[in-house]
Amino acid sequence: MDWELNTLLNELKQGKEVTNQLMKHLHPPSSHQTRQALLHKILCSYDKALSILNSNGFLVETNPTAAAFDVSDKKDVFKRRKTSSGWTEQLRLCSAKSLDNPLDDGYCWRKYGQKAILGSNFPRGYYRCTHRHSQGCLAIKQVQRSDNDPTNFEVKYRGRHTCNQASHFAATIVPVPTESKEKGNHSRKRPFQLEQKQKQKVQHVFSSLESGLVVKTEDLDNREQIFPSFSFPVESEQVKNGLFAEALMENDIMGNLSPAFMSPATSESNYFSVSPCHMGSFESDLTDIMSDPTSVTNSPIGDLDISSLDKLEFDPSFPFDNPEFFS
DNA sequence: AAGATTTGACCATT
DNA sequence: AATGGTCAAATCTT
């Protein structure tokens, strides 16, 4: 627990520090290699920090490749709260337009049900971790399109991933989405070879996007808006047309990217995938602490805004040892 | 053929 | 009885 917090803070601090160094190198501009090395270092730090958050239940989403270009639109919202059952629950609003798809958060989910919900225009989808049986992972999530804004999805997460999805994230290439399978077209060319599951996933993303762009917005309850997530929207049409130029270019610029940055989940969904080495490694209640309104600011940690990182400080007086915060 | 999704049935809770 | 969550057979996709 302490170790995780320290690591998290250290990584964030280091990210900030290295970014400052980079800033100096930009005035006047230094060698390309130097900048590249610094960028890589920054990204690794954020990678680790975010992985820690992820491993504790935060599905911190981002599109690292787009981050450098657009950090303005932070539509997506995370809220975490405790359920009466004591389960941790993550509530998330996300915009379909931001390519941030509720069906794709970097994890592999398997749909096991769908139910019409009273008073809701859209059915609620029930998903559980694909590795439920193979690895006994009990993580589940519910996805429901917002009534008021069908471009938004409300996603509830329950349970933590105890599975190791490392293999899922590893050794994949930036995918190019294919046609929606729900539309019955499966014959699009794919410039890149994708793993089977990835192809399905990509299709899913875009089928949802297509079907998602129908009505308009709602906000759940702002009171508990705790953790605005990373959101680096990419025009869905762009992506659908396979225009990954920016992403590819960015990858090129970055050169040596961390595994997470190479993950398909990242590039196709704006999610910051979890580093394999951290998957399911932590069983602390960091996320619960983080989700408590008293323990975290509303600063979006995901916009890579250095100044906002300053606000991401744990309250030193926060009663981490107080059992009541974990009950 | 294997794995994922769909969807009506079933179950638990209120 | 109504509602939400899960199961599981049928179906679909690859």
Image (tube, coloured by chain):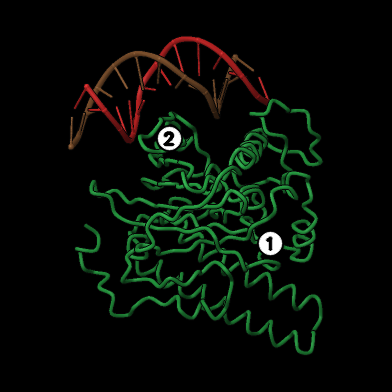
Chain colours: A green, B brown, C red
* Mark 1 burial class by Cα count in 10 Å: few <14, some 14-19, many 20+: some
Left or right placement of residue A173 versus residue A225 in this view: right
Q: Secondary structure at mark 2?
A: strand
Residue A219 percent across, percent down from the top left: 44, 56
Q: Which residue is mark 2?
A: A126
Where's the C terminus of chain A, which quadrant? bottom left
Q: Nearer the viewer, residue A166 or A188?
A: A188
Residue A99 percent across, percent down from the top left: 63, 50
Give the CA distance from mark 1 to mark 2.
30 Å
Q: Residue at x 58, y 75 (%)?
A: A305
Q: Residue at x 45, y 32 (%)?
A: A134
* Mark 2 burial class by Cα count in 10 Å: few <14, some 14-19, many 20+: some
Disc 1 with disc 2 on a shared chain: yes
Q: Amino acid at mark 2?
A: Tyr
Left or right placement of residue A177 versus residue A8 in this view: right
**Label 2 marks which chain's residue?**
A
Q: Which residue is mark 1?
A: A66
The reply to whether discs 1 and 2 touch (Cβ–Cβ < 8 Å) is no
Left or right placement of residue A301 versus residue A81 in this view: right
Residue A135 percent across, percent down from the top left: 43, 36
Of mark 1 and mark 2, the one earlier in the sequence is 1
Q: Residue at x 79, y 50 (%)?
A: A243
The dot on residue A81 is: none
**Label 1 marks which chain's residue?**
A
Q: Amino acid at mark 1?
A: Ala
**Above or below C5: residue A44:** below
Residue A271 percent across, percent down from the top left: 57, 53
